[in-house]
Image (cartoon, coloured by chain):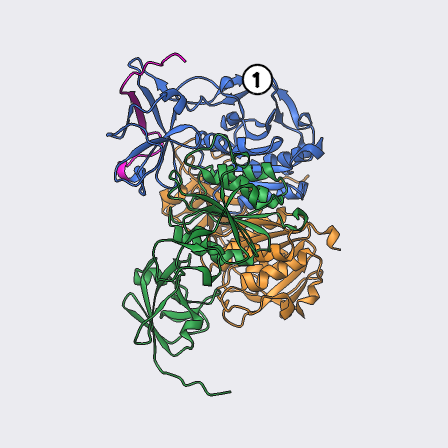
Chain colours: A blue, B green, C orange
Amino acid sequence: MADSLPGIVTLTTDFGLSGPYVGAMKGVILSVNPRATIVDITHEVQPQRVEEGCFLLGAAWPHFPSGSVHVAVVDPGVCSERRGLAVATPAGFFVGPDNGVLSAALPDSARPRGFRGIAKPVRLPQGCVAVAISNPDYVRQPLSRTFHGRDVFAPVAAHLTLGVDIDTFGERVTSILALPLFRAVRKADGSLAGRVVQVDRFGNLVTNIRAVDIGGSDVTVEVEGAVVHGLTTTYGDGDDLVALIDSSGYLEVALPRGSAAELLDAGLDAPVTVRPVIVRLKRPQ
Amino acid sequence: MADSLPGIVTLTTDFGLSGPYVGAMKGVILSVNPRATIVDITHEVQPQRVEEGCFLLGAAWPHFPSGSVHVAVVDPGVCSERRGLAVATPAGFFVGPDNGVLSAALPDSARPRGFRGIAKPVRLPQGCVAVAISNPDYVRQPLSRTFHGRDVFAPVAAHLTLGVDIDTFGERVTSILALPLFRAVRKADGSLAGRVVQVDRFGNLVTNIRAVDIGGSDVTVEVEGAVVHGLTTTYGDGDDLVALIDSSGYLEVALPRGSAAELLDAGLDAPVTVRPVIVRLKRPQ
Amino acid sequence: MADSLPGIVTLTTDFGLSGPYVGAMKGVILSVNPRATIVDITHEVQPQRVEEGCFLLGAAWPHFPSGSVHVAVVDPGVCSERRGLAVATPAGFFVGPDNGVLSAALPDSARPRGFRGIAKPVRLPQGCVAVAISNPDYVRQPLSRTFHGRDVFAPVAAHLTLGVDIDTFGERVTSILALPLFRAVRKADGSLAGRVVQVDRFGNLVTNIRAVDIGGSDVTVEVEGAVVHGLTTTYGDGDDLVALIDSSGYLEVALPRGSAAELLDAGLDAPVTVRPVIVRLKRPQ
């Protein structure tokens, strides 16, 4: 079985790059499997923002080979009684605290409903198994209280790349904590109420409003008092804000060669509303 | 042929490290070639500064093994009609948008002349071939409008590491856009007029003035009203600005154990002038 | 011998990630050994803070496999006459300037005493050998004056991963410069006087006061005018500062879901005092 595994471990954390933490995790992984390929998704998740970690992991992991092991450590409850999980899905393995960050591993249909909010327990869908990590043979001894990324999740991830059976690490669990989908809500008047879920390095405002829910280009997009008329297909060269569909299929508000976030003083969670301008009738094929 | 390739892909982008973009590109590369070695040159190019991306790539790639694949994505025109290129040179492969960023791959003699400015078309020198990427079998489907780093350049780069022939990706082109060399200009009075092309983390001001053009140490260096007398060979310990030749052979202005950039309030593009103090006569050998 | 080496090179520098420097070093390493696994510890050491570089390297390298090669380049004296070293210890290899940064490689007993201060020469302990790098066959020619990370330390590290004997690189030396241990001092009144040695991304204040020296939880911790009563075992959820033992066994002051560094306006080197509240008598076993 190990022969068919790609030996890849991805890391998504809020540790930043200025401390010794990420290096220590990589040392632990390579001590178990010196041939592992370790890839940073990001270590710049805002400190303890579980939802942002889940969003970023969910945007990156589907591009990795099947059988990769994805470790996510955004863990405000590290010292408390929250469980540590290893989850196997048809697409790969996911390792981290049971606080919702691993819900990026679940199909949309398994995620709880709601605009946003705290993580809720959901049943694992068919084809997925999860264990609560407890086997002391696979975690660092003595176990620190504050750095389970190094002491629990890194060694378990490394052993998964070697083909160690997931049931080795602990007892099966049937439900895990999951965050609601990052989805806009349709209001009675037909508008879509969403919010900014990521501000990228260019100052583009990435929203949780899907192209498939917008349905067309004849809309207005409202954010922080500004109104953008219609969607474009390019960032363009003008002086005005534009709205377009990004590479993940979500609505994004951008300022050509500038920062929409700065212009609008808009950040994470800023409300965004999409209103239809013209109701088009679909012609039958 | 693939056996002789080192399987290395380098990445130079303006994506930053806080989003899922770099991780997504690496996932795509590893999905095509799980044995690829991926190396970040930098992802901190100032947003959409094509010239800076070209400069940084040019400073790093010559240190990599022959046959490495260098991907550069600084791409303000991603949604427009600019071409995506794969270029083969005797030193390796270069993949990215046709906007001048790939001119780092060209020998100096093939670059357009001029102090600075926009990219101009140049003929490819002998021994180099380039193709405009168009083969849909080697790009992600559906192709996003805004993330060709993931959808076009990453998969083409990964296939190049496997020995896929460059002509597979599209039709040959005979000229590509190239930026003028980052070179100082010699004035009629014998002075060299250059500028700051990089401010490093220490606040050192890296210029585009070459040691070989300066020719000796008996010069004055002027930048933002300050005058440095003579070149030194060490950063030293004093309280005064120093001028020296950096590790790439270019003039650099530094403040010992401090930041020249802060002291002078000098940044990218600040003018720098080098004037000869004594004209030395070369003795015949 | 090379067969038993893990082929791992770690990098700890103050180069930052926005320049071409780290990429150039990796290119040099991969040119010597294309199969090397290169891991960044951090490149965000404060510019020329040798002691911080030593601290971060010391916190990370023990987690790596035996035989790994650890390169540390925090090198304010790069242009001066300081030596470049390669050190072999039972745990692995260490390569960098002889300015104290490599003292992270030494056991505590070999480090000079003192609260803090400048590096002093110490004899290498038994089982360790060091050479002053001088063999021109293993450094880049021409050697730059300002970038020995690329021209000296990277190629030597890469050759060490291939099993090249350490004596190949230069003459043996019997003493190297080492920094005092990052240790708190016990005062006559029984208190421990330490300081902040790292501010992490969460604003937690990591001190140089060891759990083993504190001995129990019945203490007060004073930092920048604030007093914390007792140690806790979790970051918790309250509004008050907490003190706890971190994952490396050192005292840390934290603000639950906030930044202790911001609240106290405390940074590197801030004094921290631990005072016993109750003297417990140990019962004989």
Q: Residue at x 43, y 35 (%)?
A: C256
How many discs mark residues in the rendered view? 1
In the image: residue B36, left or right of residue A242: right
Relative image position of residue C140 (x, y in whole percent): 58, 66
- Front residue of B105/C48: it is B105
- Front residue of B90/C53: it is B90
Relative image position of residue B69 (x, y in whole percent): 55, 49
- Quarter location, residue A217: top left
In the image: residue C206, left or right of residue A137: left
In this rendering, is residue C134 above or below A58?
A: below
Q: Residue at x 58, y 31 (%)?
A: A95
- Front residue of A199/A53: it is A199
Asked if residue A278 is among those painted magenta in the image, a careful observer would answer yes
Asked if residue C179 shows in the view, the reply is no
**What kind of element bears circle 1?**
loop
- Quarter location, residue A247: top left
Look at label 1 and name its amino acid.
Answer: Pro
Relative image position of residue A219 (x, y in whole percent): 29, 23
Q: Which residue in the protein does label 1 denote?
A: A125
Asked if residue B84 is among those painted magenta in the image, a careful observer would answer no
Q: Residue at x 59, y 59 (%)?
A: C154
- The chain letter for the residue carrying disc 1 is A
- Front residue of B46/B227: it is B46
Which residue is farthest bottom? B284
Asked if residue B31 shows in the view, the reply is yes
Magenta region, residue range: A263-285
In this rendering, is residue B167 above or below C171?
A: above
Q: Mark 1 packing: few (<14 Cα in 10 Å), some, or many (20+)?
A: some
